[in-house]
Image (cartoon, rainbow, N blue to C red):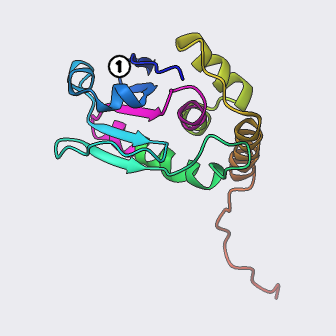
Amino acid sequence: MVLWTNIDTIIGGRLFLGSLPAAESIYTLEQHRITHVISVCNEKIPERAQYSYMKVPVEDDKHANLLKWLPSTCDFIDNAMQSGGVVLVHSRDGISRSATVVAAYLMFRMGYDSNGALEAIHGCRPYVKPNDGFKQQLRAFEARLISKVECKPIKLAPIRAAK
């Protein structure tokens, strides 16, 4: 088993992608001024009072449903960053699950398509490789985002009968 102990910045010192050992390291969290942690794994990490945590208990399996968590993880990241926070998204190795969550955020906030988001992350962390099921779920998330943009409801004046 490979354990990546480093974290990589995805959005200019505000959003990081990493592994379980990085999330467990007080030194790493303090060095990068992390305030919020999304833990995308079933392994337990010590939760410390000075950090805000979100737990996403999903296995790295192509049949696991990570899609249902993507809207809430995007909101968690967005809220943290809007309040000046710095976010670490991690999974056991920082390769598949956490990369999928970060890709979803890039799609949600920055308008990337699923392939573009993964390419952008790969440029920062070359060994990311979401499993095929998670890639498919990113495409489904992309379709949801597109449908929300194209089908926004608008308010119209009430229809009045002609006299």
**What residue sits 50% from the left and 53% below the top?**
72
Identify whether 135 is placed above or below 149. Answer: above
| Residue 109 rendering spot, x and y as whole percentages | 54, 36
Residue at mark 1: 13
Rendering quarter of residue 131: top right
- Of all residues, the one furthest to the left in this rendering is 49
Residue drawn at 62 percent across, 35 percent down: 107
Residue in the image at 61% along x and 35% along y:
100
The residue sitting at the right extreme is 162
Image position of 161 with respect to 96: above or below: below
Percent across and percent down for residue 54 are 39, 49
Counting other residues with Cα less than 10 Å from the Cα at mark 1, is it few (<14), some (14-19), or many (20 or more)?
few
Which of the two residues, 157 or 88, is positioned nearer the viewer here?
Answer: 88
- Depth order, front residue of 58/151: 58
**Towards the viewer: 131 or 15:** 131
Query: Which span is picked out in magenta?
Result: 79-103
Mark 1: amino acid: Gly
- Residue 83 magenta-drawn? yes
